[in-house]
Amino acid sequence: MDAAPNCAICNGPAYPECSCESERLQIAVKQAEHRAMEAKLAEIRDWVIAHARQHILNAFERLTSTRKQAHSAYLASLPNYSIYMQYSGHPPIHPGYIAQLQSQIAEAHAELKRGIDADWRASVLRYPEVLDYFYSLIELKIPSDRSPRVVEPPFAAAGYADRGYDHSRIGKESKKKKRRDREASVGYKDEQMIAVAGRSMRGPPAAPTPPILPGGYPRPPGMYPPY
Ligand SMILES: [Zn+2]
């Protein structure tokens, strides 16, 4: 006798294997990933962007403050600059000197502006590697396979009792989709729970399970619809 269980979705024979379960598993994984990871990814993204931006701004500030100091020093070194400033641009000197000084000042200001633009461009163009750096500081922590929480999750210690597959829900899925999206897929779980029991992971069909006492196994909040 072939003990391999039939498809949990269409009840087709185990061999040749149909695609129902793997398709459902893919959907379930996407949904679970969305529920589990979306908030974490958003938090990581915000953290990385904030630190990358601050680093780029600091680097830009360092570049430009050096450049502004050099600019000020250059202006101060120009002939007649101090008297020109002292008389607010109208010093009692030959107009020829004033015109020459003004053109030197204008040129220096334009050079400063070009330099600041270049500093900004150089800083902003570093974003890809700066983002890489801050993302690299995020640590991924996967629990040990020997962790008790991994070996024995705190639910369904006796296995899962058969609740069947509700085919009538298939047609309602599109109508329910909007509401489901809003409620983060609550109410769509029994298909998923069937689907995540991938055929390759299944053992022999379970013996009839004793009724599971309500509350006997504390469930993480929000993981299952009430039934
Ligand atoms: Zn099937």
Image (cartoon, helix red, strand yellow):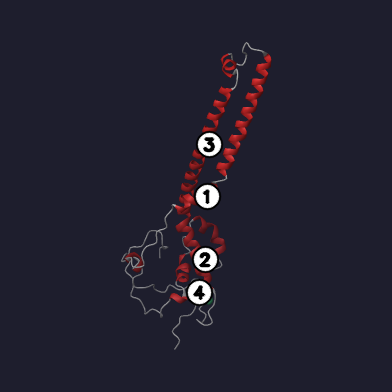
Mark nearer the viewer, 4 or 3: 3
Mark 2 nearby-residue class (10 Å; few <14, some 14–19, many ≥20): some
Distance of mark 1 from mark 4, alpha carbons?
47 Å
Spatial distance from mark 2 to mark 3, Cα to Cα?
50 Å
* Residue 112 in the figure: left or right of residue 195: right
Closest to the observer, 21 or 33: 33
Disc ID at residue 129: 1
Residue sitting nearer the eye, 137 or 205: 137
Q: Residue at position x 49%, y 38% from top? A: 58
Residue 152 picture location, percent across and down: 34, 68
Q: Name the residue under label 3.
A: 63
Q: How far apart are marks 2 and 1 (CA)?
A: 34 Å
Of the image marks 2 and 4, the number of the one nearer the N terminus:
4
Q: Mark 2 or 1 closer to N-term?
A: 2
Chain-order first, disc 2 or disc 3: 2
Q: In this view, does 57 lie above or below 27?
A: above
Q: Report if residue 28 is visible in the image.
A: yes
Q: Which amino acid does label 4 sit on?
A: Ile
Left or right of 148, for residue 169:
right
Dot 4 corresponds to which residue?
9
How many C-alpha atoms fall within 10 Å of the one at disc 1: few (<14), some, or many (≥20)?
few
**Element type where label 2 sits in the image:** helix
- The residue that mark 2 highlights is 27
- Which marked residue is nearer to the observer: mark 2 or mark 4? 2
The amino acid on which the numbered mark 2 sits, given as a three-letter code, is Ile
Q: Can residue 42 be seen in this view?
A: no
Q: Marks 3 and 1, how far apart in space? A: 18 Å
Query: Which amino acid does the dot numbered 3 rest on?
Result: Leu
Q: Are marks 2 and 3 in contact (CB under 8 Å)?
A: no
For the N terminus, the quadrant is bottom left
